[in-house]
Image (tube, rainbow, N blue to C red):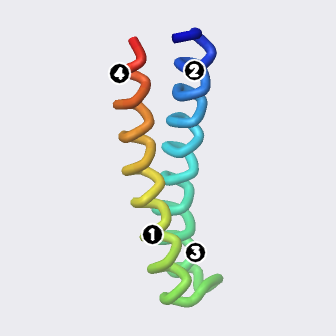
Amino acid sequence: MPPIFKALATITAWFLFIWGLILAVFDGLVLPLIEQITMTQAYLATGLGITSLILSVVAMKLRQMLE
Protein backbone atom coordinates (compact mmCIF):
# COMPACT_ATOMS: atom_id res chain seq x y z
CA MET A 1 0.00 0.00 0.00
CA PRO A 2 1.34 3.45 -0.83
CA PRO A 3 1.87 5.68 2.22
CA ILE A 4 -0.49 8.29 0.79
CA PHE A 5 -3.49 6.17 1.83
CA LYS A 6 -2.30 6.18 5.45
CA ALA A 7 -1.90 9.97 5.32
CA LEU A 8 -5.35 10.46 3.79
CA ALA A 9 -6.94 8.21 6.41
CA THR A 10 -5.23 10.21 9.17
CA ILE A 11 -6.36 13.55 7.75
CA THR A 12 -9.91 12.28 7.30
CA ALA A 13 -10.05 10.89 10.83
CA TRP A 14 -8.86 14.17 12.36
CA PHE A 15 -11.28 16.20 10.24
CA LEU A 16 -14.22 14.01 11.27
CA PHE A 17 -13.16 14.13 14.92
CA ILE A 18 -12.89 17.93 15.05
CA TRP A 19 -16.10 18.38 13.03
CA GLY A 20 -17.90 16.00 15.41
CA LEU A 21 -16.73 17.91 18.45
CA ILE A 22 -17.83 21.22 16.95
CA LEU A 23 -21.27 19.88 16.04
CA ALA A 24 -21.89 17.96 19.24
CA VAL A 25 -20.56 20.50 21.72
CA PHE A 26 -21.03 23.91 20.15
CA ASP A 27 -24.12 23.48 17.99
CA GLY A 28 -25.76 20.85 20.18
CA LEU A 29 -25.15 22.36 23.61
CA VAL A 30 -24.02 25.98 23.51
CA LEU A 31 -26.27 27.55 20.88
CA PRO A 32 -29.56 26.28 22.42
CA LEU A 33 -28.50 27.74 25.76
CA ILE A 34 -28.13 31.21 24.26
CA GLU A 35 -31.28 30.64 22.17
CA GLN A 36 -29.65 30.96 18.73
CA ILE A 37 -31.13 27.73 17.33
CA THR A 38 -34.21 25.65 18.08
CA MET A 39 -34.10 22.39 19.97
CA THR A 40 -34.88 20.41 16.81
CA GLN A 41 -31.81 21.88 15.15
CA ALA A 42 -29.80 21.15 18.28
CA TYR A 43 -30.89 17.49 18.24
CA LEU A 44 -29.96 17.24 14.57
CA ALA A 45 -26.55 18.84 15.18
CA THR A 46 -25.86 16.54 18.13
CA GLY A 47 -26.83 13.49 16.08
CA LEU A 48 -24.59 14.55 13.21
CA GLY A 49 -21.77 15.24 15.64
CA ILE A 50 -22.03 11.82 17.24
CA THR A 51 -22.18 10.21 13.79
CA SER A 52 -19.06 12.11 12.78
CA LEU A 53 -17.26 10.96 15.93
CA ILE A 54 -18.19 7.35 15.20
CA LEU A 55 -16.97 7.69 11.62
CA SER A 56 -13.67 9.11 12.88
CA VAL A 57 -13.19 5.96 14.96
CA VAL A 58 -13.91 3.86 11.87
CA ALA A 59 -11.36 5.88 9.88
CA MET A 60 -8.72 5.39 12.59
CA LYS A 61 -9.42 1.66 12.60
CA LEU A 62 -9.00 1.63 8.82
CA ARG A 63 -5.72 3.53 9.18
CA GLN A 64 -4.52 1.01 11.73
CA MET A 65 -5.34 -1.84 9.33
CA LEU A 66 -3.26 -0.16 6.60
CA GLU A 67 -0.07 -0.54 8.67
Mark before the other along the chain sequence, 1 or 2: 2
Instruction: Name the residue at 56% across, 55% down.
Output: 22
- Inspect the image, locate mark 1, and give the three-letter code of the amino acid beneath it: Thr
- Quick check: marks 3 and 4 in contact, CB under 8 Å? no
Element under disc 3: helix
Mark before the other along the chain sequence, 3 or 4: 3
Disc 4 designates what residue? 65
Disc 3 designates what residue? 31
Q: Nearer the viewer, mark 4 or mark 1?
A: 4
- Inspect the image, locate mark 2, and give the three-letter code of the amino acid beneath it: Phe
Mark before the other along the chain sequence, 4 or 1: 1
Element under disc 2: helix
Disc 1 designates what residue? 46
How crowded pointer 1 is (Cα within 10 Å; few <14, some 14-19, many 20+) is rated as many
- Inspect the image, locate mark 4, and give the three-letter code of the amino acid beneath it: Met
Instruction: Name the residue at 63% across, 15% down.
Output: 4
Disc 2 designates what residue? 5
* Residue 17 position in % (x across, y down): 49, 43
Q: How far is the residue under mark 3 from the one under mark 1?
A: 11 Å
Q: Nearer the viewer, residue 66 or 47?
A: 66
Q: Nearer the viewer, mark 1 or mark 2?
A: 2
Element under disc 1: helix
Placement of 12 over or under 16, stated as above or below: above
Q: How far is the residue under mark 4 from the one under mark 1?
A: 29 Å
Mark before the other along the chain sequence, 3 or 2: 2
